[in-house]
Image (cartoon, rainbow, N blue to C red):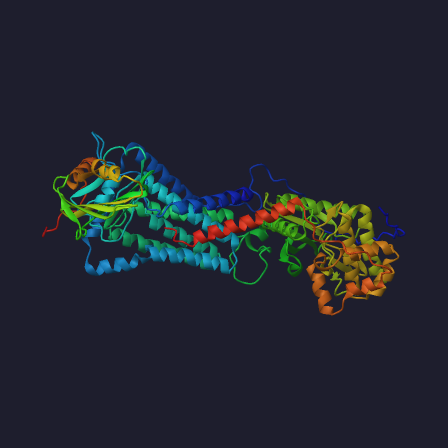
Amino acid sequence: MTTLPQAAPAPRPAPGPGPPAIHRVRRRRRPSGEAPPLPRHLNASGKWWLALSALVVVVWVVVWATGTVGLFDVADTRVLQAFEEVRSPGLTEVAEVAGVLASDTAIYALWLTNLVLLIAVRRWRHLFVGVAVGIIVVNVGASMAATLKRPRPYEVEIIGPWEGFSMPSLRVTVLATFLLITVYSLVPAGRYRTIAKWVVCALLAITGLSRLYLAQDHPTDVLAGVILGVAVPLAAFRLMTPNDVYPVRYRRGRPAHLDLSGSRGDAIVKALQDQLGLLATSVEPFGLAGSGGSTPMRITVKAAGGGESCVFAKLYAATHVHSDRWYKIGRTLLYGRLEDEQPFHSVRRLVQYEDYVLHLLTAAGLPVPTPLGIVEITPEREYLLVTEFMAGAKEIGDAEVDDGVIDQGLAVVRRMWELGVAHRDIKPANLLVRDGRLVVIDTAFAEVRPSPWRQAVDLANMMLVLGLRTDAERVYRRARMHFSDEEIAEAFAATRGLTMPSQLRRMLRQQGRDLHADFLALLPYQLPPVRIQRWSWRRIALTVATLVAALLCGAVFADLLRSPL
Amino acid sequence: MTRRAVPAALALLLAGSLAGCSNDSTSAVLAAPLCPVDDDDADNGVILMAQSVPTASWVPCIRTALPLGWGFLHLEARDGIAQFWLNSDRDGQQAVEVRLQPSCDTEDATEIVSDREGMRRFERVRQMSPTFDGERQYLFDGGCLTVVFQLDGDSPGEALALASQTIGVISRDDLRAQVHEASGGRIELDPPAGEDG
């Protein structure tokens, strides 16, 4: 194996200015038992509905075990007889119309509408929870009815359609569930959802009264159906799609970006004071356009000598870990063995890793924002990574790039090579220039002891970014002071197409010049391109598993298109 | 929590969907509608069938344990009709269907001597082989009990005997008495008859 000749060591880039002077107060440890800044909760109504569901189950177990169902039968029968007393042809017609929501056609239409709308707005998590809840409720309701075996109402004439045993009223259960799915997955939280809940309440009341008038169900059947049909979706949506993490919204915006106002904003302010001793006065989104994997923000804090200063923070949530996992699976499918990373399994690990990389690079003298600490917002779900705010810095694509900046960029890559680190996301948005000093940000994708291929890609991408505001010849000339021809040739053999960040590819296209070809033309010789597509057993297994999963999903989806009843 | 909940919910989703494939209707009753035996009352499935056809003076039920090789599939009861099916390991799935309706068409059927008191019996055979396809109908006050045979096996005799021996009937009066007693005399099965009736 040939060893590439090493270029002369380059001077390390000068360290950036220190963090802004921030006023710090005494930190406070959260005592055992105290809720975290942003606790996960079901809300009082969710707990009430779950308690009612449990009560229904307990009551029926007792009734079933003691054989005292007759008491309920008598009470229910008297109520239904009272309805029977007021029957008239006109009222019967009204009741038949009022009960139409519980018909086969209406329930099926509601189910399909929910599915189609959730697919159309690509709200996959809500779709997934809604479908799971729908299937669970239908099967639990049917199983309960089959276990309790309660006949239809006695001693009254049943004048509406019915089928099967009556407790709980399966149609009311399913209708309540499907309406709740609509409310929690399609209606934005706040005023609209509150109105929708009252509408659902009214619809269920009308349907229930209709079914009692027509004597299709006992009153306790309807009551049990409503409780079961409301409690299960309510608990599922509040636990699995909490609104502050998975908001229902129709305006444009990346789903990765979380809402920083309201309870989360308050929690961030409180957590910063308790955990880092920072007195935040405002929290606002910052640089959302350049971030797809977290929610970046600028936090205004009180400065040491009075006045205000700023810190930068990135909020990571469980959604970002899931995105990271899918992203890495996707890249493994696309690139095979070259994508050699394992996904993170928790938000805490993800944030710890980025914080560690920042400390590593800071200690090595690389120009990165100084890390200020990790803040826990919700345990295992949301963490904030706080760093120095690079006030006045411009993206390299908008900044003046002189030989000094070019040298700093190339020295950064050289220093990372020496440290055994690859940044892996060298693009204009991640290279800032402030007062002629280059700063590298967003080290979330950095890798310790990367493959030589990744290190080579970092160099080529850095040269391409630097060439955007200058030209290939100038960058190449400066690069030869830091790297050998062999190293530069290797970098451009490793880098092409998809190995460049999409922002860099887009900017190259916009400029209308083939900067990559310009660099290749300057090389004294070219190395054969590094093959990106590499097969491994893991890639083959993952591809097969993906195909099987897609087939299964297709089969399940086809089954879901049938009527749930 | 979420990491564990998602695969669990996925498994439930898959299981639910697969379970849904095997069951035609969520209102299907899987327990056999057993006739009263000694001190035991008739099963609630029998009462449900009686409610399906409020005019029927007789209601079908399963009298004894099914012979070896036979199994109960499920019961479906709705307003106007109640049906249940029996599976056979020799005569196939849904080899015997028992159906209770307010009335039925006996045209083209041959009336023979009835083996059940208070009922008229009709037989209709459409095909003998390779599959036995026939019906037996019992007409009585306010209802009709139909036993449909779709037998894949060689000898239909066993299924025809099963229809006579295992499938029983219980009178509506007995069911009324059962409901009355079970509620301590406070509830009746049927609403009081109208002034005209």
Is residue A45 visible to us here?
no
Give the residue drawn at x 23%, y 58%: A92
Q: Is residue A131 above or below residue A148?
A: below
Residue A323 located left or right of residue B44: right
Give the residue drawn at x 47%, y 50%: A556
Point out the residue furthest to the right here: A8
Q: Is residue B192 above or below residue A407?
A: above
Give the residue drawn at x 71%, y 62%: A505
Residue A222 vs residue A158, the one in the foreground: A158
Residue A99: % across, % down: 30, 56
Is residue B60 visible to us here?
yes
Residue A3 vs residue A66, the one in the foreground: A3
Point out the residue furthest to the top here: B38
Residue A28 located left or right of residue B141: right
Residue B170: % across, % down: 18, 38
Residue A511 vs residue A99, the one in the foreground: A511
Q: How many marks?
A: 0
Residue A549: % across, % down: 54, 48
Point out the residue furthest to the bottom here: A512
Residue A113: % across, % down: 43, 59
